[in-house]
Image (spheres, rainbow, N blue to C red):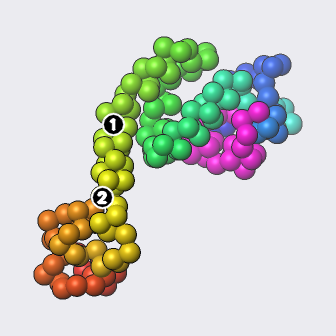
Amino acid sequence: MTDINREIRTHDLAPGEVARRAGVAVSALHFYEREGLITSVRTVGNQRRYHRDVLRRIAFVRVSQGVGISLADIRAALATLPEGRTPTKADWARLSRSWRTTLDERITRLEKLRDTLDDCIGCGCLSMQSCRLANPGDTLSEYGDGPVRLLGRS
């Protein structure tokens, strides 16, 4: 989303510079902007310019996506950061604390997957009584053996 209300500063960055420094494509910047994750301002010639704090926001988006946080959750978190100033270490710490429970739950699920994956690999049926991952409690056994989820039954 382009913000026409913020003034352009001489140290604002062009999209190519932001992309280079953040390690993303310019198209990713445009995507992040459309998703409301970052903002830009426009020059008199209608060119995008980004405030320097966008680099930290992009880094945060990339790391968050890398651990499986949804764009909606990332957007909501970024919306809690201050406008008009670069977020401080305390701002980022507060934000990361808010995800701790979610990340701990995700870690628990991943550990369970790691520890039980060999019980399920290769079977393909998703309804075996011993499948503790895809069918805990064998809730699909009433449909018989085989890939019943692929048939649209649940």
> Badge 1 is on which residue?
104
The 10 Å Cα crowd at callout 1, few under 14, some 14 to 19, many 20 or more, is few
Identify the mark nearer the N-term, 2 or 1: 1
Which residue in the rendered view is the most extreme toward the right? Answer: 45
Q: Determine whether 58 is above or below 95 in the image.
A: below
Tell me the kind of residue under disc 2: Thr
The 10 Å Cα crowd at callout 2, few under 14, some 14 to 19, many 20 or more, is some
Tell me the kind of residue under disc 1: Asp
- Residue 90 is left or right of residue 116, and the answer is right
Q: Which residues are magenta?
A: 21-42
Q: Determine whether 90 is above or below 96 in the image.
A: above
Magenta region includes residue 120: no
- Residue 73 is left or right of residue 43, and the answer is left
Mark linked to residue 116: 2
Q: Residue at x 63, y 35 (%)?
A: 58
Q: Determine whether 145 is above or below 76 in the image.
A: below
**Quarter placement of the C terminus:** bottom left
Residue 53 percent location from the top left of the image? 66, 23
Q: Nearer the viewer, residue 118 or 46?
A: 118
Q: Residue at x 36, y 30 (%)?
A: 100
Residue 103 percent location from the top left of the image? 37, 37
Q: CA distance from mark 2 to mark 1?
A: 18 Å
Q: Nearer the viewer, residue 112 or 140?
A: 112
Residue 41 percent location from the top left of the image? 72, 31
Q: Residue at x 63, y 42 (%)?
A: 33
Q: Determine whether 42 is above or below 122 in the image.
A: above
Q: Tell me if I can see residue 42 in this picture.
A: no
Quarter occupied by residue 18: top right
Magenta region includes residue 35: yes
Q: Nearer the viewer, residue 151 or 105?
A: 105
Q: Tell me if I can see residue 142 in this picture.
A: yes
